[in-house]
Amino acid sequence: MVQQILFFVHLCVCFVLIALVLVQQGKGADISATFGSGGQSGSAQSGHDLLAQLTKYSAVVFFSICIALSSLSNRQMRLEQRLVAPSMSTPAPTIAVPLAPAGIPD
């Protein structure tokens, strides 16, 4: 149950992170704006900083959830191996069955 909720949150953060990266301008756009028209105000820079901060925090959350999901999956796998291992380690009883009765000629 915890893994399913965490996986859903992981998907939501993934889509938010993709959207934040796609909304941001590249470094080439900043250089062309510097040498091109100088009509940008300081609010555009603060908006860029806000997007960069949101991207950074969503990436931290994304990777933290990746590590948590990996840890939960590993713990579940070890638990399943512990439950299955004792039943597989005990050998099955063998019954000796003679191939042919002892007093009958071929």
Image: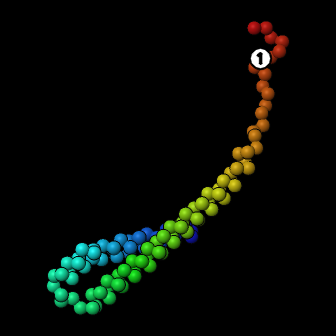
Residue displayed at 29% across by 87% down: 45
Residue furthest to the top: 105
Q: Secondary structure at mark 1?
A: loop
Residue furthest to the front: 35
Quarter of the N terminus within the rendering: bottom right
Residue 53 seen in the current view: yes
Quarter of the C terminus within the rendering: top right
Residue 4 seen in the current view: no
User: Is 72 positioned to the left or the right of 52 in the image?
Assistant: right
Mark 1, residue position: 100
Residue displayed at 35% across by 84% down: 49
Q: Amino acid at mark 1?
A: Ala
Quadrant in the rendering for residue 42: bottom left
Residues 38 and 1: in front is 38
Q: Position of residue 103 (x, y in %)?
A: 84, 12
- Depicted 49 relative to depicted 92: above or below: below
Residue furthest to the right: 103
Q: Position of residue 23 (x, y in %)?
A: 29, 76
Residues 32 and 7: in front is 32
- Depicted 90 relative to depicted 8: above or below: above
Quadrant in the rendering for residue 48: bottom left
Quadrant in the rendering for residue 70: bottom right
Q: Position of residue 56 (x, y in %)?
A: 42, 77
User: Is 87 positioned to the left or the right of 72 in the image?
Assistant: right
User: Is 41 positioned to the left or the right of 49 in the image?
Assistant: left
Please tell me how crowded label 1 is: few (under 14), some (14-19), or many (20+) other residues with Cα within 10 Å. few
Residue displayed at 73% across by 50% down: 86
